[in-house]
Image: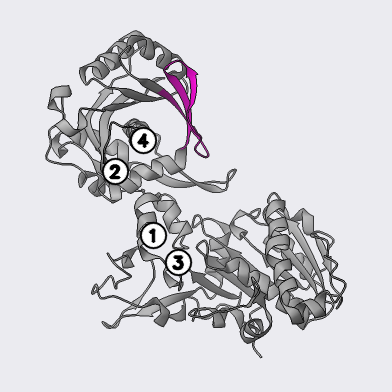
């Protein structure tokens, strides 16, 4: 009996026999006999379920075996043990009898000892692999490998050095091509689930197949059926181990409209990682100049409130990126949101000046000229001083938001009267600007007027932040990106106001 058939026969999930119905990609993975297996997957494709099932199969199949399971963080390890592993053992009658018996005693989370002498050690290794030193194991399972300390796989594998089994199973969701998950996947057979098309093409499930109502062949635009796919190895001769990549498009529970919604709302790097299970290529521009140019309309750049389309005059928002130092310039972007499209009506860039009073005077005059009602401006550096001074000069605006970049979004907090403090996620918020560009939901003035500012939008590239273990966006030292940040401040606030204000009716 193959491991796949064994799991279907003996394992229960939520009180019912586990089912792998309409998952043609799973039998090959469960039945692989390679010494190493790596799964590079998007979120929510049952990779942790695979680890759980394989752990139980191994503990029963090989009495007295020692299994080591490693997660980046201890809370992940605890949740896995209590919410995933033990419920499967307790709910599967045959498995419960073999591993626990009639006592009903629950094993310790970090060191599970079972009736048949099999043992499971669960550890965390975010900073280093030291947590597993001194443990002699037979099987090593690593989940969320992309967040495990880089370079520690040899340390973790050393725990198996005296075992006759010495099998390793690695799963994770990709981040960048430089991440160690991508490294081990590249050393494996790197099997891809390719779908045949009537035109003769074998189609890879990536962004190119996203049709209006379902996956299509990028060559001939015919609809394709992911359930008819086959595993095709990229490195058929690999001796390192077997690798497989799975994403949302292959799963039977795919809600295609929701996937398209994520494509429209996620930043490009996040969608590629989380939904398609594909890495982000570092150094690549998030959008191209051509994509930004395609966002330019036939409208001339508005020079005052009266030039703004009537539908946008009721609630104009200014985003200000304050300059500072010898090179950074102050940029003001004025716009509004309509049907989830951010319409930029005016962009102004002020050259570096030694006297800040003149910059403040010009920015305040611009806001009054366009009858701006809300302002969002960066609160770092000079912004901590400029924002208070600008607010005193602009007595007619309703609120001003001082923006600071953070890892994740927080709700705005009232600071002093009309001044609010607001921390927003740098990468997610900038990612939304790029998503708007790609989906034509950023509307710029005509190219002749917008051309001087376009390079400050498309200059951003992807970079891996090793300290945070995540993708971040950066730009060359020789190319400023002040316009991009001013657009980000304005469009983020516009979306926030749009969702909460009676100014907008749809």
Q: Which residue is mark 1?
A: 258
Instruction: Report how far apart the C-alphas of labels 1 and 2 lie in the structure.
Output: 17 Å
Image quadrant assignment for residue 360: top left
Which disc is residue 208 wearing? none
**Residue 309 seen by the camera:** no
Q: Which residue is mark 2?
A: 340
Sequence-first disc among 3 and 1: 3
Instruction: Report how far apart the C-alphas of labels 3 and 1 lie in the structure.
Output: 11 Å
| Residue 30 falls inside the magenta stretch | no
Within 10 angstroms of label 4, few (less than 14), some, or many (20 or more) residues? many
Tell me the magenta residue range.
401-425
Q: Position of residue 350 (x, y in %)?
A: 28, 20
| Residue 417 falls inside the magenta stretch | yes
> Is label 3 or label 1 in front?
1
Within 10 angstroms of label 3, few (less than 14), some, or many (20 or more) residues? many
Within 10 angstroms of label 1, few (less than 14), some, or many (20 or more) residues? few
The outermost residue toward the bottom is 1
- Main SS, magenta region, reads strand
Do the residues bearing badges 1 and 2 touch, measured as CB atoms within 8 Å? no
Q: Which residue is mark 4?
A: 488
Q: Is residue 446 placed above or below 59 in the rendered structure?
A: above
Do the residues bearing badges 3 and 1 touch, measured as CB atoms within 8 Å? no
Sequence-first disc among 3 and 4: 3
Q: Position of residue 501 (x, y in %)?
A: 34, 32
Q: Position of residue 186 (x, y in %)?
A: 52, 68
Instruction: Report how far apart the C-alphas of labels 2 and 4 lie in the structure.
Output: 14 Å
């Amino acid at each position: 009996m193959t491991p796949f058939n064994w799991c279907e026969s003996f394992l229960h999930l939520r009180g019912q026999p586990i089912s792998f119905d309409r998952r043609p990609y799973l039998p090959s993975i469960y039945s692989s006999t390679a010494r190493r297996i790596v799964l590079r997957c998007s979120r929510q494709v049952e990779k942790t379920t695979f680890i759980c099932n394989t752990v139980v199969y191994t503990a029963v199949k090989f009495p007295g075996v020692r299994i080591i399971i490693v997660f980046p963080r201890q809370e992940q390890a605890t949740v896995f043990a209590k919410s995933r592993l033990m419920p499967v053992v307790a709910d599967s009658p045959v498995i419960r009898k073999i591993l626990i018996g009639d006592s009903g005693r629950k094993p310790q989370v970090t060191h599970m000892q079972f009736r048949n002498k099999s043992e499971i050690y669960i550890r965390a290794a975010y900073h280093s692999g030291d947590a597993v030193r001194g443990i002699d194991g037979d099987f090593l399972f690593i989940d969320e490998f992309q967040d495990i300390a880089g370079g520690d796989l040899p340390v973790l594998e050393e725990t198996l050095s005296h075992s006759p089994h010495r099998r390793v199973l690695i799963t994770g969701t990709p981040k960048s091509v430089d991440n160690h998950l991508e490294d081990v996947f590249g050393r494996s057979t790197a099997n891809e689930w390719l779908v045949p098309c009537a035109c003769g093409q074998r189609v890879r499930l990536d962004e190119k197949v996203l049709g209006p109502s379902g996956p299509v062949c990028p060559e001939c635009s015919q609809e394709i059926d992911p359930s008819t796919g086959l595993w095709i190895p990229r490195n058929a001769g690999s001796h390192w181990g077997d690798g497989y990549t799975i994403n949302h498009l292959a799963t039977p529970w795919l809600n295609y409209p929701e996937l398209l919604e994520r494509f429209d709302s996620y930043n490009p790097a996040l969608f590629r990682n989380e939904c398609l299970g594909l890495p982000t290529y570092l150094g690549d521009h998030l959008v191209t100049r051509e994509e930004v140019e395609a966002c330019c309309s036939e409208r001339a750049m508005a020079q005052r409130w009266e030039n703004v389309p009537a539908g946008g005059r009721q609630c104009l928002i200014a985003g200000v990126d304050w300059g500072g130092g010898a090179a950074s310039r102050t940029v003001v972007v004025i716009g509004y949101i309509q049907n989830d499209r951010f319409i930029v009506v005016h962009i102004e860039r002020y050259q570096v000046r030694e006297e800040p009073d003149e910059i403040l005077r010009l920015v305040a005059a611009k806001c009054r000229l366009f009858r701006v009602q809300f302002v969002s401006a960066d609160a770092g550096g000079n912004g901590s001083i400029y924002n208070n001074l600008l607010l005193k000069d602009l007595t007619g605006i309703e609120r001003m938001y001082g923006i600071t970049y953070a890892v994740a979004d927080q709700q705005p907090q009232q600071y002093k009267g009309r001044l609010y403090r607001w921390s927003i996620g740098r990468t997610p918020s900038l990612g939304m600007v790029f998503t708007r560009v790609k989906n034509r939901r950023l509307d710029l003035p005509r190219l002749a007027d917008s051309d001087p500012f376009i390079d400050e939008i498309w200059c951003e590239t992807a970079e891996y932040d090793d300290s945070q273990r995540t993708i971040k966006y950066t730009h060359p030292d020789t190319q400023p990106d002040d316009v991009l940040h001013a657009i980000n401040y304005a469009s983020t606030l516009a979306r926030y106001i749009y969702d909460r204000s009676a100014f907008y009716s749809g």
